[in-house]
Image (spheres, helix red, strand yellow):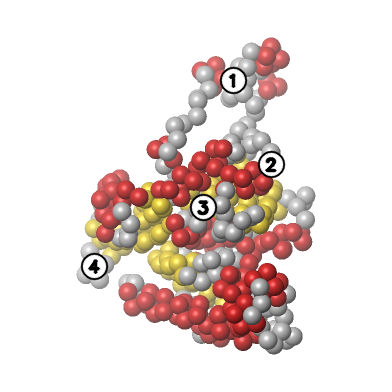
Amino acid sequence: MFNKLKEFFPPQKRPSRGQKKLRKYSRKSIPFRKILERLDWVTPEIGPPVRIGLDIGATSIRTVTMEHINGKARLIDLRFLPCSTEPISNLTQELKRIFTEKFEDNVEIHATVSGASTLVRYITMPQMSEKEFRQSMSYEAEKYIPYQISDVVVDSYLIGEDLDERGKKIIKGILAVCKRDAIKTVLQSCRDVEAPLTLVDAPPLAVINAFQFNYPDSLKETVGLLHIGQSACNLSILLKGEPVFTREISFGGADFTQAIVKGLSITTDQAEKRKLAFVWKNDTDIRPLIVEALGFLAQEIRLSFNYFENHVTKAEPPSKLYISGSSTQLDHFQELLAEQTGIPVSDWDPLAKIEVGHHIEASRVTRLKPGLAVCAGLALR
């Protein structure tokens, strides 16, 4: 959502009038093409739009590259990079490791920043135009956020109109807030590696975007979306396809690792290996530690659902909880979470309706797919 990046960096130099005119034609159709190229009058031929979703996590970076043609998306590249320091201490250095080639003119990068730096709120206001709604956010935002307005970048999106309990027309919108320093860090690091960053989004909104694109049939009911990262997770609720609730929960994949560290008195590296190799039937020493750690998350989910049902107008309880994130691949994870929350739980495919290029190994896609919800949603913007 945070696509107002001009306040941080000035726009790039625009092509001359001659370049603009020649850009309309293919290279083959231009007379005296070689002579014009020597004079630097012909710009490279621009192919179909390519968008890279850049998910900057606490301990790793993921990218998904999609080519967009006639309203359809095609996966042409995906990458996963465990970072050299935890948490990331030098983002520019890590981006140099994952972006190893020059970018073409038709490429855009859509990035997200750490979940702790962003905040999403759903708001209702008296009926007004979209322009008036956006203008009002400049002073209304302070009512909804716990930060100084000068320390954050605020963006908003109008969802639509509705009726309140008294039958009066209201408008519903999304207010997204990101710490200014976090956006500056991502922008400057992308500029240092000459990466064409054009949009910054909040992680839960990217997940919602990917789900809406890939599962349109599920938008007729009320569902929950839970994306588990390394240090935190985001829980969102869609009411018949419309996002109405989002909350960050201070629980992530690292909490399972730390539960094993404390329970078995072993190092973090040893605990991480045990977690990744966990088998429900065999690892009886780890099993109760996983169950106990998951109990905290289940309790927070139940509290969130109860709050939603009590405070959101026309609310229906979620009929299903869809989960994503690498940690959801733990053996028996779905069954345990369903048992502790009392709601059906299922994973979902962030690439379900996206064509996968033949040159990409199927085994690689299968291995990385659970953690691609954020960057897939970014690449689909």
Residue 310, above or below 124: below
* Residue highlighted by disc 1: 22
Label 1 or label 3, whichever lies nearer to me, is: 3
| Amino acid beneath label 4 | Gly
* Residue highlighted by disc 2: 100
**Residue 111 percent coordinates (x, y):** 53, 49
Comes first in the chain, label 2 or label 3: 2
Q: Alpha carbon of mark 1 to alpha carbon of mark 2: how far? A: 30 Å
Comes first in the chain, label 1 or label 3: 1
Label 4 or label 3, whichever lies nearer to me, is: 3
Comes first in the chain, label 4 or label 1: 1
| Amino acid beneath label 3 | Thr
Residue closest to the eye, 245 or 163: 245
67 sits to left or right of 130: right
Q: How many marks?
A: 4
Residue at 28% in and 48% down = 138
Name the element at disc 3. strand
Residue closest to the eye, 119 or 267: 267
The answer, for residue 240, to whether it is visible in the render is no
33 sits to left or right of 302: right
Q: Alpha carbon of mark 1 to alpha carbon of mark 3: how far? A: 35 Å
* Residue highlighted by disc 3: 112
Q: Alpha carbon of mark 4 to alpha carbon of mark 3: how far? A: 38 Å
**Residue 25 percent coordinates (x, y):** 62, 23
**Residue 196 percent coordinates (x, y):** 56, 38
Comes first in the chain, label 4 or label 3: 3
Name the element at disc 2. loop
* Residue highlighted by disc 4: 167
Residue at 54% in and 38% down = 191
